[in-house]
Amino acid sequence: MKLISSLFVTAGVVISLLFNAAHAAESAQKPAVEEINKVCPISGKPVNPKITVVYEDKHYAFADDACRTKFNEARKNSLYQKLGGRAAIDAAVESFYVKVLADNRIKHFFDDINMTKQRRKQKEFLSAAFGSPVPWTGKDLRKAHENIPGLNDTHFNAVAENLQKTLEELKVPKDLIDQVMAIAASTRNDVLNRPKKAE
């Protein structure tokens, strides 16, 4: 009887350890909302940790239900989401740089560039430009391109052509391609560091 009792105690300890380990692993995978954002991304007010949403594996907390609703609507209506979100941007950027690095008009601009870093930055920038909830925190376009000698409209056009071909090959609907290309065109003066127009 003593042996059976000892086995039950040992089994209980093992089960308890396994449960605690599983719980710790689960907690590590799901960061607390408080660690993600303490300020509502919509209102700028302190968040209520019970009002949350998960978008692309990231937790967002909001001040109230109205803010959460506004966030969800913005995601649903964003060009980013209509294109397919993170997975689509990743695929597009990977395909885009294959074309860019094979294009004799522009490939020399990337000779000394860490392309792993470049792809990551491009994914982050395009995601933000198309309406991802994660804002762009890198250099602005003027700073990023200011020390590139000889950069001109021909090069900008080549990049734009490669972007459009990439989107067409990925079977992106034409109306969405048009929106992407309009956003790309709006960056021309900044990329080429032309003087800003007076407002």
Image (tube, helix red, strand yellow):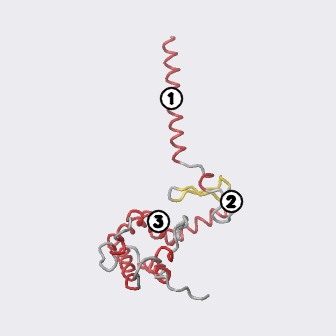
Whether tag 1 and tag 3 are in contact, CB under 8 A, the answer is no
State the image coordinates of residue 34 (x, y, percent, origin top left): 63, 52
For residue 19, above or below residue 12: below
C-alpha gap between disc 3 and disc 2: 25 Å
**Label 2: few (<14), some (14–19) or many (≥20) C-alpha neighbours in 10 Å:** many
C-alpha gap between disc 2 and disc 1: 39 Å
Q: Amino acid at mark 3?
A: Gly
State the image coordinates of residue 114 (x, y, percent, origin top left): 38, 64
Q: Nearer the viewer, residue 54 or 93?
A: 93
Q: Nearer the viewer, residue 10 or 194?
A: 194
Q: Secondary structure at mark 1?
A: helix
User: Image point 54% across, 48% down: which residue?
Assistant: 30
Q: Give whichever of discs 2 and 1 has the lower sequence position.
A: 1
Q: How many marks?
A: 3
Q: Give whichever of discs 3 and 2 has the lower sequence position.
A: 2
Residue behind mark 1 = 15
Q: Amino acid at mark 1?
A: Ile
Q: Quadrant of residue 150?
A: bottom left
State the image coordinates of residue 157 (x, y, percent, origin top left): 39, 83
Q: Quadrant of residue 52?
A: bottom right
User: Image point 49% across, 82% down: which residue?
Assistant: 193
Q: Nearer the viewer, residue 133 or 55?
A: 133
Q: Amino acid at mark 2?
A: Ala
Residue behind mark 3 = 85
Whether tag 2 and tag 1 are in contact, CB under 8 A, the answer is no
Left or right of 150, for residue 132: right
Residue behind mark 2 = 63
